[in-house]
Image: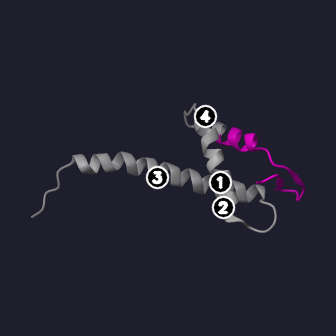
Amino acid sequence: MITKIVKRDGRAVDFDLDKITQAIYKAAQAIGGNDYTAANDLAQKVIEYLEAEQTDGLPTVEHVQDTVEKVSSKTVTQELLKSSSFIVQSVPVFVK
């Protein structure tokens, strides 16, 4: 369980999942999103990913940001694959 995070100035502070959720939600709002629950779900996936890494030391703000990008792109890609697989299965394939 992550309890501390290293800020940009080197200070270790209490970890707050809500700060990640808020950042994701604000980013989503900037592009027209408005689903706080989805932002919280993504933040939870980020935490699961970070905890699965089992690295030595405390996570840094930069590492958490990188992980948000990685997990969100993976999540979006999976959603696109699910929707595009339907499209691919619905379009007939013509072979010479």
Question: In the rendered image of this protein, does residue 18 appear above or below residue 70?
Answer: above
Question: In the rendered image of this protein, does residue 46 appear above or below residue 19?
Answer: below
Q: Residue at x 38, y 48 (%)?
A: 82
Magenta stretch in the rendered image: 1-24
Q: Position of residue 66 (x, y in %)?
A: 66, 58
Secondary structure at badge 4 equals helix
Numbered badge on residue 23? none
State if disc 2 and disc 1 touch (CB < 8 Å): yes
Numbered badge on residue 77? 3
Cα separation between marks 1 and 4? 17 Å
Q: Which residue is mark 1?
A: 48
State if disc 3 and disc 4 touch (CB < 8 Å): no
Cα separation between marks 1 and 3? 18 Å
- Which is in the foreground here, disc 1 or disc 4? 1
Q: Earlier in the sequence, mark 4 or mark 3?
A: 4
Q: Which residue is mark 2?
A: 52
Q: Earlier in the sequence, mark 2 or mark 4?
A: 4
Secondary structure at badge 2 equals helix
Q: Residue at x 75, y 42 (%)?
A: 19
Rate crowding at label 2 as few (under 14), some (14 to 19) or many (20 or more) other CA atoms within 10 Å. Answer: few
Q: Which residue is mark 4?
A: 37
Rate crowding at label 4 as few (under 14), some (14 to 19) or many (20 or more) other CA atoms within 10 Å. Answer: few
- Going by the numbered disc 1, the residue's amino acid type is Glu
Cα separation between marks 1 and 2? 6 Å
**Which residue in the rendered view is the most extreme toward the left?**
96
**Which residue in the rendered view is the most extreme toward the right?**
11
Magenta span has 78? no
- Which is in the foreground here, disc 1 or disc 3? 1
